[in-house]
Image (cartoon, rainbow, N blue to C red):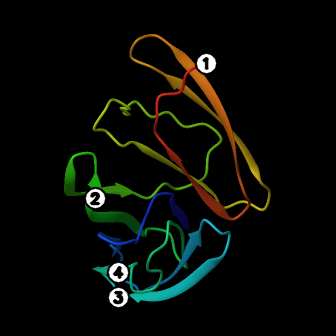
Amino acid sequence: SRCYLAEGYTGKGFSQWILLMNPLDREFMVQIRYILSSGKSVVKVVTIPPRSRMTVPVNTTVDGQEVSASIISDQEGLIAERALYFNYEGGNGVWSGGHNVMAVGAPREEWYFAEGCTRPGFHTWLTLQNPGEDDARVTLDYLCGDGTNTSRTVTVRARSRYSVAGRRERV
């Protein structure tokens, strides 16, 4: 089975973890492919015992990087998520916190995100992962709370990832 985690960062003040769970009565062999913005990748292989979980620290393998992950298990049933904890210097001080997401089971051509704010003091980021063999041309349609809408097109290179900084786009 395969799953994907598009967003991640291991720079100063950020700690990223991939959390894996094996709910079955047999061992799982799991390949984690860290995909970097440069298009390069780093592979880590782990074995998860039956009916157990594992926490994989991403920073120890790819420190100081924007990083996505493609996770391949030798069996169906793997559960994967990503946790990220941070001290982020922005705006008028340091923000600390964390968030986590479940891995998705397959790439898709269309996604919808309801949350995002570009008002002063907010920093919203959108991370795009392209695990495919061809470059992907991506159109971002911003539907703003004041009724204005705008679009932006970016290219995400094959086997790469791309971060889009949230900012108010004017047409």
Q: CA distance from mark 1 to mark 4?
A: 42 Å
* Residue on which disc 4 sits: 57
Secondary structure beneath disc 2?
Answer: strand
Q: CA distance from mark 3 to mark 2?
A: 35 Å
Q: Secondary structure at mark 4?
A: strand
Q: Mark 2 or mark 4, which is nearer to you?
A: 2
Residue lying furthest front: 92
Q: Sequence-wise, which precedes: disc 1 or disc 3?
A: 3
Taking the spot 36% from the left edge, 76% from the top edge, the residue there is 24
Quadrant into which the C terminus falls: top right
CA–CA distance between discs 2 and 4? 19 Å
CA neighbours of label 4 inside 10 A, class few (<14), some (14 to 19), many (20+)? some
Q: Residues within 10 Å of mark 3 (few under 14, many from 20)?
A: some
**What is the x, y in percent for residue 112?**
50, 33
Is disc 2 in contact with disc 4, using a CB cutoff of under 8 Å? no
Q: Nearer the viewer, mark 3 or mark 2?
A: 2
Q: CA distance from mark 1 to mark 2?
A: 30 Å
Seen from the viewer's position, the closer of residues 81 and 60 is 60
**What is the quadrant of residue 37 in the picture?**
bottom right
Marks 3 and 4, how far apart at CA: 18 Å
Report the residue marked by disc 1: 171
Q: How far apart, in angstroms, are the residues tagged by discs 1 and 3? A: 54 Å
Q: Using the image, tell me which numbered label, if any, was put on residue 28.
A: none
Q: Is residue 58 left or right of residue 29?
A: left
Q: Nearer the viewer, mark 3 or mark 4?
A: 4
**At label 2, which amino acid type do we have?**
Tyr
| Residue 49 numbered mark, or none | 3
Q: Residues within 10 Å of mark 1 (few under 14, many from 20)?
A: few
Q: Is residue 94 left or right of residue 2?
A: left
Residue 102 shown left or right of residue 71 in the figure: left
**Disc 1 residue type?**
Val
Image quadrant where residue 98 sits: bottom left
